[in-house]
């Protein structure tokens, strides 16, 4: 029971860090365009993150049971996967790099599962189909979306910006900024909602996996009657898990993430309200679609590439390519580094007598 409480606390720490690490995803553009003050933007993001986190559990199911063989998963496995993601998130946050919390968690879990299985690569679910014939596994749910979503974000953002430019070219900058300043409130709320509906579910899936693992291992057999809600003989995302993760993510979002906000909102490209609206709308639509399909998509990839696309639509030289290069390197290293951190954490725990 003690190890479960440690895992639960670690999962909530990850969710809190996810909230302030990815807060920039929802509010960087609305802050940089001065449509809202930082405090107002964080409040908006926290509220809509909370609402979005309460909507559905498809992504949670993918994280909890669709990527690794649950038969090799122990509490130490889950703890190690979370630690790998937490370490990487803090490192990238410190350097102001908008990396993916989603891929950090997935990489950490896969590396930890590999170590727990004694280096049996078969425990990683690469690609298969479920009972309904839908594609599941790391390739269709993680790797393929990791490649396609940035492309969709980039070209989708550029196309929407191109269309908007045609529509507004006869209006004065004052009118355009006034109109899209109001519209950006809607797009920022939609973006925050989409972020909550996708990212919060990842921790829900991890906690549900911990509950399932604890029940299967007999760790909860001696629980008193009042704690019987912890026993889950089948993988299921309980309501208390949903509410807890939603609240913790909202609290993390309220703490803000100014280093990453500066990178996305100021250092990469100069934005006006119409550009912020185009980027947020594009990214939010991508995330909403992924959440419905149960795909644990990277919010960071979606909004960052949308901003890149919008910036390119202004002119190629509008983007600061040195900043873009640093971001892309962080993305490339996220999965393997977190996988290695998760793997090494399991090995360290085993050496200390914890399995």
Image (cartoon, grey):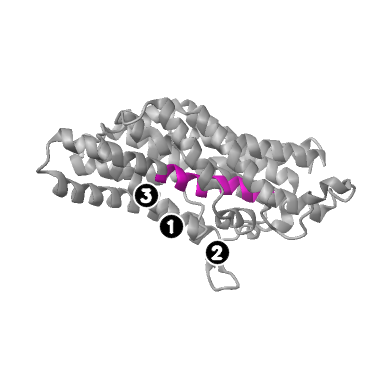
User: How many labels sit on residues?
Assistant: 3
Image marks 2 and 1: residues in contact by CB distance under 8 Å: no
Give the main secondary structure, helix, strand or loop, of the magenta stretch. helix
Residue 199 within the segment the image draws in magenta: yes
Question: Badge 1: how crowded within 10 Å, few (<14), some, or many (20+)?
Answer: some
Q: Secondary structure at mark 1?
A: helix
Q: Nearer the viewer, residue 262 or 231?
A: 231
Q: Position of residue 57 (x, y in %)?
A: 58, 55
Q: Residue at x 33, y 49 (%)?
A: 282
**Alpha carbons under labels 1 and 3: distance apart:** 14 Å
Give SS at disc 2: strand
Q: Residue at x 51, y 52 (%)?
A: 296
Q: Residues within 10 Å of mark 2 (few under 14, many from 20)?
A: many
Q: Earlier in the sequence, mark 2 or mark 3?
A: 2
Q: Residue at x 84, y 46 (%)?
A: 226
Is the N terminus in the top left, top right, bottom left or bottom right quadrant? top right
**Residue 116 in view of the camera:** yes
Q: Mark 3 highlights which residue?
A: 150
Q: On the picture, is 147 further left or further right than 172?
A: right
| Mark 1 and mark 3 residues within 8 Å of each other at the beta carbon | no
Q: Which mark is residue 136?
A: 2
Q: Is residue 301 left or right of residue 215?
A: left
Residue 82: image quadrant is: top right
Q: Which residues are magenta?
A: 190-207
Question: Tag on residue 289?
Answer: 1
Label 3 Cα crowd, 10 Å radius (few <14 / some 14-19 / many 20+): many
Distance, label 2 to label 3, CA atoms, is: 20 Å
């Amino acid at each position: 029971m003690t190890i479960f409480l440690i895992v639960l606390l670690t999962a909530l720490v990850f969710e809190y860090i996810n909230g302030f690490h990815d807060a920039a995803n929802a509010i960087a553009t609305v802050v940089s365009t001065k449509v809202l003050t930082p405090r107002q933007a964080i409040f908006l993001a926290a509220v809509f993150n909370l609402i979005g986190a309460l909507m559905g559990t498809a992504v949670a199911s993918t994280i909890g049971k669709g990527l690794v063989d649950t038969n090799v998963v122990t509490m130490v496995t889950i703890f190690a996967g979370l630690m790998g993601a937490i370490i990487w998130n803090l490192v990238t946050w410190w350097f102001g790099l908008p990396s993916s919390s989603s891929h950090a968690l997935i990489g950490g879990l896969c590396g930890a599962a590999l170590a727990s299985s004694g280096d049996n690569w078969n425990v990683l679910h690469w690609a298969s189909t479920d009972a309904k014939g839908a594609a599941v596994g790391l390739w269709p749910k993680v790797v393929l979306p990791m490649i396609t979503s940035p492309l969709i974000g980039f070209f989708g953002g550029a196309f929407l910006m191109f269309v908007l430019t045609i529509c507004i070219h006869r209006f004065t900058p004052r009118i355009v900024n006034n109109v899209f300043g109001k519209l950006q409130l809607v797009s920022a709320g939609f973006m925050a909602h989409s972020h909550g509906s996708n990212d919060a579910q990842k921790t829900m899936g991890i906690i549900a996996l911990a509950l399932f693992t604890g029940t299967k291992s007999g760790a909860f057999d001696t629980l008193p009657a009042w704690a019987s809600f912890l026993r889950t003989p089948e993988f299921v995302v309980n309501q208390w898990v949903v509410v807890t993760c939603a609240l913790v993510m909202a609290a993390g979002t309220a703490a803000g993430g100014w280093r990453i906000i500066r990178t996305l909102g100021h250092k990469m490209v100069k934005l006006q309200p119409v550009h912020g609206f185009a980027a947020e709308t594009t990214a939010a639509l991508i995330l909403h679609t992924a959440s419905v399909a149960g795909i644990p998509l990277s919010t960071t990839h979606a909004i960052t590439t949308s901003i890149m696309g919008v910036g390119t639509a202004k002119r190629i030289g509008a983007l600061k390519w040195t900043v873009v290069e640093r971001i892309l390197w962080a993305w490339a290293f996220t999965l393997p580094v977190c996988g290695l951190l998760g793997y090494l954490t399991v090995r360290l725990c085993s050496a200390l007598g914890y399995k």
